[in-house]
Amino acid sequence: MIEQFVKAGQDLASEGLIHSTAGNMSIRKGDVIYVTRHGARIGSLKFNDIVRVNLLDDRKDAQADASVEVKVHRSIYNSAPEISAIIHAHPVYSIVLSLDSEKIECIDCEGQFYLPQVPVLFQCAETIGSECVESNLPALMSSHKIVVVRGHGVFSCGKTFDEAFGYISVLESASKIIYLKRMLTPRG
Ligand SMILES: [Zn+2]
């Protein structure tokens, strides 16, 4: 299992979708979540960077080492049994577009095919380890594979890390295209 974490972390780093110790990832197996440790460098994960917590609520001390976003991961898993992998990353162009939009509408062929419309969770004032995100994200993720939390980053889900990574990669590429198109379009 560690190999899956290492590969996904390297994939994210190689495409510039994370930086330093930002971002986190998890896998669900039965009643257990394996999640990256708080402060782990996602691009160069080691065995002891993976923390095991319960799918249902843990005592605070049991999850003290886990990512601050573990409650958000848990809320998504508990609302969607088909999801078994989650990646949270900070793709820059997707974040920029989230600042003044309530959804990202892809304009390139690949984006339109895989992710025609990506919702932005914009209601939350606090977005890091946030109860507001924990409460509101599962509803959006029930109908979309990836959601952008305004000004913060994306949560992407799938059956595997490869699937979740793919959505982030496609969205960030599509977001760059939207951004560059705006730069080229003369303003009236
Ligand atoms: Zn984050």
Image (tube, helix red, strand yellow):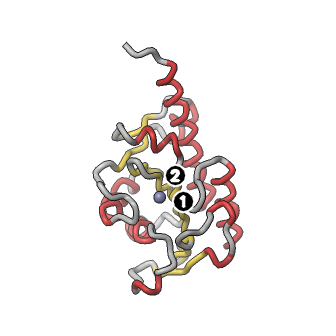
Q: Secondary structure at mark 2?
A: loop
Residue shown at 44%/67% (left/top)?
69
The answer to whether mark 1 is within 8 Å of ligand 1 is: yes
Residue ID at (48%, 64%): 82
Disc 1 marks a residue whose amino acid type is Ala
User: In x, y percent, where is residue 149?
Assistant: 40, 51
Please, what is the three-letter code of the amino acid marked with disc 2?
Answer: His
Asked if disc 2 is less than 8 Å from ligand 1, the answer is yes
Identify whether 153 is placed above or below 63.
above
Q: Is there a contact, CB below 8 Å, between mark 2 and mark 1?
A: yes
Q: Along the horizontal axis of the image, is 163 left or right of 102?
A: right
Q: Percent from the top left, x then y, of residue 15?
A: 65, 47
Do we see residue 27 in this rendering? no
Question: Tag on residue 22?
Answer: 1
Q: Does residue 61 lie above or below 1 as drawn?
A: below
- Can residue 139 be seen here? yes
21, 107: nearer the viewer: 21
Q: Residue at x 48, y 42 (%)?
A: 94
Q: What residue does disc 2 label?
A: 90
Spatial CA span between label 2 and label 1: 7 Å
